[in-house]
Amino acid sequence: MRYNNRGKDQIRPVKFTVGWGEYPAGSVLIETGKTRVLCSATVEERVPPHLVGSPEGWVTAEYAMLPAATQTRGRRDIANLKLAPRSAEIQRLIGRSLRSVTDLRLLCGMTVTVDCDVLQADGGTRTASITGGWLALWLACEKLKKQGVCPANPVREEIAAVSAGIVGGEVLLDLDYSEDSRADADFNMVMTAAGRVIELQGTGEARPFSRDELNELLDLGTKGIAELCAARRRACGGLK
Amino acid sequence: MRYNNRGKDQIRPVKFTVGWGEYPAGSVLIETGKTRVLCSATVEERVPPHLVGSPEGWVTAEYAMLPAATQTRGRRDIANLKLAPRSAEIQRLIGRSLRSVTDLRLLCGMTVTVDCDVLQADGGTRTASITGGWLALWLACEKLKKQGVCPANPVREEIAAVSAGIVGGEVLLDLDYSEDSRADADFNMVMTAAGRVIELQGTGEARPFSRDELNELLDLGTKGIAELCAARRRACGGLK
Amino acid sequence: MRYNNRGKDQIRPVKFTVGWGEYPAGSVLIETGKTRVLCSATVEERVPPHLVGSPEGWVTAEYAMLPAATQTRGRRDIANLKLAPRSAEIQRLIGRSLRSVTDLRLLCGMTVTVDCDVLQADGGTRTASITGGWLALWLACEKLKKQGVCPANPVREEIAAVSAGIVGGEVLLDLDYSEDSRADADFNMVMTAAGRVIELQGTGEARPFSRDELNELLDLGTKGIAELCAARRRACGGLK
Amino acid sequence: MRYNNRGKDQIRPVKFTVGWGEYPAGSVLIETGKTRVLCSATVEERVPPHLVGSPEGWVTAEYAMLPAATQTRGRRDIANLKLAPRSAEIQRLIGRSLRSVTDLRLLCGMTVTVDCDVLQADGGTRTASITGGWLALWLACEKLKKQGVCPANPVREEIAAVSAGIVGGEVLLDLDYSEDSRADADFNMVMTAAGRVIELQGTGEARPFSRDELNELLDLGTKGIAELCAARRRACGGLK
Amino acid sequence: MRYNNRGKDQIRPVKFTVGWGEYPAGSVLIETGKTRVLCSATVEERVPPHLVGSPEGWVTAEYAMLPAATQTRGRRDIANLKLAPRSAEIQRLIGRSLRSVTDLRLLCGMTVTVDCDVLQADGGTRTASITGGWLALWLACEKLKKQGVCPANPVREEIAAVSAGIVGGEVLLDLDYSEDSRADADFNMVMTAAGRVIELQGTGEARPFSRDELNELLDLGTKGIAELCAARRRACGGLK
Amino acid sequence: MRYNNRGKDQIRPVKFTVGWGEYPAGSVLIETGKTRVLCSATVEERVPPHLVGSPEGWVTAEYAMLPAATQTRGRRDIANLKLAPRSAEIQRLIGRSLRSVTDLRLLCGMTVTVDCDVLQADGGTRTASITGGWLALWLACEKLKKQGVCPANPVREEIAAVSAGIVGGEVLLDLDYSEDSRADADFNMVMTAAGRVIELQGTGEARPFSRDELNELLDLGTKGIAELCAARRRACGGLK
C-alpha cells in the first residue's frame, strides 16, 4: 500500500505557488507530496564565454539542497570544497532539458539562470525542479516579452518530468523517498505535454530490467507528465 | 517616511511559522517585513574535535543566502570555492550568541547545528537569524528534554536581535535594505529579553558617531528586542 | 556516408589489449575506432566510510581525459580546482553499472577501483570505458579468485555499453565524435550480453523524439552490445 | 595583579618602528607588550571590479598570523584551503575602519592594501593591526602627496583601536592573551583620537553584561585610544 | 647485478613512437625500460598574462601520473584539491629546460604546452619526460615552420636528460625504481647533446657525497645523454 | 661593481638573532644583506601518517613569503587557493636538507616543523632559510636534549646553503636579487661545513654552462658555506 492510499499510476498531490519570491523574474514554489523546491529564474545581461559574440543567449540551472532538507542533515558543498557530484549531474540535466525547448536566439546577449533550491526532499526533487523550473523560466521569458526585450516568448514548448520505478515487483509512478530507496529500477523521464521524449535516465540498480518493463515505465511516465502539465496550466491561469 | 508608514521606533511586522520543515528537530520560518529566514536546528551525536572527551556538547550555526534571495542574483559559495566572508562572520555571531545562553554540559556528546538559510533578503537577515534560530534551538532542546536525553532544556535564557541605525540624521529601529544601504551608522544588537547585552556590533560606515547617539541606538534596540521576544512567545504558545 | 563506409548498424572496429599495464590487477587498453581508453582495475584493502563494518566490499570508477586527448587541448581538472562535472557524471555511471553485476559480499573489506583514462577521444569514451572497464574488473576479480581471496569471481554477468543516435534523420549505431556533435538525439545504453537493460541515458538535444525512434535506438544498441561482448570474449581467450 | 604590575586602566608599553621594511610605501612594526604586528601599506594602480570606472579608489586590508606566532603552532590557511574565518572577519574590520577615515576620491584609480602580519601574538592583535595599520596607510598616502599623485593626504582623521574587558569581575583596559582567555566579556573599540566611535564589537562570552558595565568599558577604551594616538604621533615625529 | 644484466654505465633500452596520438601537433610515446611517458605538444594562440604585449611566446609543461601507473595506486590531484608538490616541481623543471633552448621570439603570440603524462612509472619519469618532451616540442615547431608560421624552427639545440646515482657504494647510470629507492645519492642531469649543462639536481638523501663522486656522476650522465640524443635522432629519421 | 663594493667571492653581511620569537622551541631571525627570514622550529607530539607506528620521527619545513616582502606586492597563497609552486619546491628542499643530517630515530613520535617566513626578500631566501632553519632546528633539539626527551641532539652535522651564479660572464658568490635576475646561470648549494654535498640545484637559465664553470661555482659555494657556518657558530656562542 502506498502512502495515503495512492494508486500505482497516481502522481502525488502537486501545488504551484507562483510569485513566492519577490525579486526573481520568475518565482515558483513547487510542492509534490512533501517535496518542496523553490524555483527562481533570473535574467542577466551576459553570456558564458563560449557564447560571447554569438547570436544565441543561454539558459542554465543550478540545483542545491538545504542541509536540513533531508531526514539526516547533509553537509553544505562549501564545507566539502566541491559541488556534490549528484547535484552537478542534476543541474546539467535541468539545464539541458530547459534549453531543448527554448529558442536561444531570442535570448541573444542574455542568460537566464534557473535556481532550483530544495527546501524539503522526499524523493523526486530533480523531476520537481524541471517541472517547477520550466514555469519559472516561462514566467521570466513572459516578462521579457512584455518588456519588449523579446518579440515572442522564447520557450517554445511545455515540458515536465516525473519518475517511475519497479518496487517489490510492481511498476509505480512518481516514487517518494521510501519507495525510491527500495526500488529495483528507477526511471526519470522528461517529456513534452504530448509525450515526446526529451530525456530518459533509467537505471536497474538492483537488477537488469526487460524491454517490456521499460515500456510499462514509459507509459506511466507519459501519463504523469500530461497530468503535471495540466495542473501547472491551471495553477498559473493558463499559459497565454 | 518609512515604508508602510512605520514609525522610527517601530519594528517590522514579524511572523514565526513553527514546524515549517518536517525533518529538523526544530524548524522555524521567520518573516520580518520581506525578509524570510528558514531556521532549522538538527541534533547530531558527535562533537567537534576540540570537545572530544569533554563534558560539554556544542551549538553551532551556519548561515547562507539563496542566490535569488536578493534583488541582484548572487553567486553560490561553491562557485567561488570559498564561503563568503560576510556569511562566515555572521554564522560565527549567531553561534556565539546562541552558545552564550546554552548550558553546554547538558548537551554532552551532542552538537546542535542551527542552519539559517535566507530565502528572501530585505535587510536584517543576521538579526532575524538569531531571533528565529533561538526558537529553533529551543524547540530542538525541548524535544531532547521530552525524550529524556536532557534533564532540563539547556537553553537558559531568551535572546533576540535587532538592528538600529542613523539614516539621514535620524535614529531608526530595524532597518530594511533600502534604509541600511543609506545608513551613516549601523548597529546590530543581541540582548536578553530583559535588555542585558550579549553582542554589540556597530559601525560608523559613513562617519564616526557620538556616545549620545550610541545611547539612543541602544535604547531603541532594547525596545525592539523586548517586542520580538514577546511576539515569539505568543507565536509558539508560550515557552513552557 | 559514415567514415570508412561503415554501415548504419555497424560498430567501429574494436581492439582489446589485455595486460597493457604491468602493475594493476586488471589492465585493458580498449580501442574503438580512434577512441582509446586505458582501463586499470586496482584492489585495495579498505572500504569507503559508509561500508566500514559492513559485509560488503565496493567497486568504484574514476574517469578522466588527458588534456591532449581531444582535438583542442583541454585544461586539467586541478587547474580548475574541480573535477569536470561531465567526468563526475560519467564515473558515477561507470561505477553504478559495474556494481550492478558484482556480488559485493564476495569483495568484503575490499575496494576495486577501475580507472578509465581516455588517451584519445573520438566519441563514445564513456561506453568504451564501461566495455573495457568491465574486462579490467573481471580480470582483477579472476586474480582474487586464483589467490583464494574470493571463493568465486564476484562479477556475475557480462555487460557492455554502446551509443546510438539520430543524425540527419537517420538512426545510427556507435557514433563517432563528428556524428555525435551533429546528432539530434543521443542515447547511451548499458546492457547485459542478452540485452537486458542496466542503464539508459538518452537526450533529445536538438528536438524531442518519439517512442518509435526510441525503439529503433534500443534495437540497434542491443545488437551492438552483443557484438562487443563477443569481441571481448574472443580477445581474452574466453571468460573461464 | 596584572603582568608587570600594570594598572587596570593602563595600556601595555607600545613601540612603533617606522620604515621597518624597505619596499612597502608605508611600513610600521607595532609592538604592544609581546604582541608584534608588521603593517605594510602598498599602493597599486588598479581598483577592485566594483569600482572600475568609479571616481573612487580603495583601501583594503589583509590580516594573517605566522604559524609560530602563538604558543601552540597554528596551521597555515593554505593547508586548510581556506582563510581562517577569524582572519576574514578581522581583515574586514581593519579595512572598514581605515576606509571610514579616508577620502577615497583622492585615491581614484588606486588601491592601497594594508597587510597586517602578526609575527607574535599575545592578545590584541586586531586592535594593534588597526593602530599600526593606520600609520602605514598614512605614510603611504603622505608619499603619494609628496609625489604629487594626491593633492592632499586622503587620510582625514586619526583613529586607533584598543580592547577592554571584564575579567574576574574587574573592568580592565587592553587585555593580553591570558586575560582575554579568562574574560567574561570582551570589547574591541575603534575610535578617533577625540573619542568618537568608528566600530564597536563587544561580546558577553560568558555572561550578558549591563549598560553600566558597557559604559565603563567605553570610558576605558576612550582613554586608551587617546594614549595610543599620542604615542604614535611621538613615534613618527608628528603627523605633519 | 642490475635487471637484465645491465652494465653500470648503460642506459635502459629506449623506444620512441612518433605520432602516437593523432591530435597534438607533436606526439611522442617514450619508453625507457618499463617507464612509459606520453608527450604531447599543443600550440595555442595565447600567451600567459606576463607576456601579453611582449615580442616573446611561451613554452610550458604539465606533468602528471595516471593513478594506476605505479605499483601502489595513487590518488588523483583533484581528489586532494592540489597538484602534487612533486609534480609541480617536475613540470617547472621540464618547462625551464625546454625554454632554455627555444627562441621564444619566434613563437611570438603563441604558447606551446608540452603535456607529459606518465602511463607507467619505473623510475626516471622526469628525465624521460624531458627527453621525449623535447622531441614533441621539436615536432610541433617543425609543423609551425612548414606552415610558414615560424621562419625557422625555434628549438635551437638538442637536449636530453638522464639520472645517475650512488647505490650500495656503486655509481650507476639511469636508475630504475628499485635502484632509486635504495640510492644514497641521486642526480638528475639535463644537458645538450654535447654535454653542456642545462640543469643539475642532485641530492645526498642518505649521506653527503664528495666532489669526486660528483664528477663520476656527471661523467656517466654526459655519456647517457649523448646516447639518448643519438637514439632519438634515429627514431625520427634525423632532425631535419 | 657589486652593491657596497662586495668582492666576487664575498658573501653578504650576515646576522643571526637567536630567540627573536618567544614561543617556538627554536627561533632565529637571519639577515643576509637585506634579506630577512624568520626561522621557527616547533616540536609537536605527532608524526605524519606514513610514520605512525615507526621508530622514526620527522623533520619538515614550511616556506612562505609575506606579500609585502618584495618590491612588488605578491598575492597570498590563500587568495590563489594553492601554495605557490615555487614555495612548495623550496620547502621540500629545506625539509630534505635538514632531514639528511638528523637522526630521526632520536625524534621518535615527534615532528619538528621549521617555519621559514620571509619578511623581506632580496635574493637568496631559500639558502638563508636553510642556514637559519638549521640553527632553529638545532636549538629546538638542544632543548629536547636538556629536557631529557632525547638522549643526544639528533642533529648530527652542521650544514648551510648559499648561491653562486654567472652574471655578465663573471662567476659571483651569494647573488642578491638584482644579480639573480640578470644571471645566465644560477646555482644553489647545500653542503656540510667541510664541503661535502647535500643538495645541488643549478640551472643555465639563459645558456648552458660548461664543466669548468660548474667547478668554479662549486669552489665558491664551498668557501661561502664554510664562512656562514663559522658566523653562525659565533652568533650562538658555539654549538655545544
Image (spheres, coloured by chain):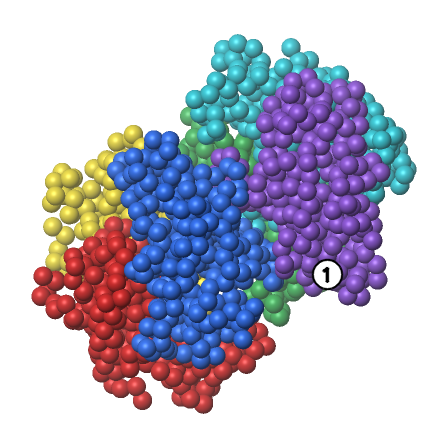
Chain colours: A blue, B purple, C red, D cyan, E yellow, F green
Report which quarter residue D101 is drawn in: top right
| Residue B154 drawn at (x, y percent) | 80, 55
Q: How many marks?
A: 1
In the image, taking residue F221 as reference, residue E113 lies left or right, namely: left
Relative to B137, residue A154 above or below: above
Does residue E75 appear to the left or right of F62 in the view shown? Answer: left
Residue C8 showing in the rendered view: yes
Q: Which is nearer the eye, F226 or E51? A: E51
Q: Residue at x 22, y 57 (%)?
A: C183
Q: Nearer the viewer, residue B70 or D100?
A: B70
Which residue is located at x 57 percent, y 74 percent?
C52
The image shows residue A30, relative to residue A150, as above or below, that is: below
Name the image quarter holding residue D112: top right
Q: Is residue C170 above or below residue C78?
A: below
Q: Residues within 10 Å of mark 1 (few under 14, many from 20)?
A: some
Q: Find disc 1 in the rendering and name its residue.
A: B110
- Which residue is drawn at the image coordinates 69% and 58% (left, top)? B25
Q: The disc labelled 1 sits on which kind of residue?
A: Met
Q: Position of residue F74 (x, y in %)?
A: 49, 35
| Residue E128 x/y as whole percent | 30, 59
Rendered image quadrant of residue C1: bottom left
Residue F236 in the figure: left or right of residue A87: right
Q: Label 1: chain?
A: B
Q: Nearer the viewer, residue F14 or B96?
A: B96
Name the image quarter holding the N terminus of chain E: bottom left
Q: Is residue F121 visible?
A: no
Q: Secondary structure at mark 1?
A: loop
Towards the viewer: F195 or C163: C163
**In the picture shown, does residue A54 fall above or below A190?**
above
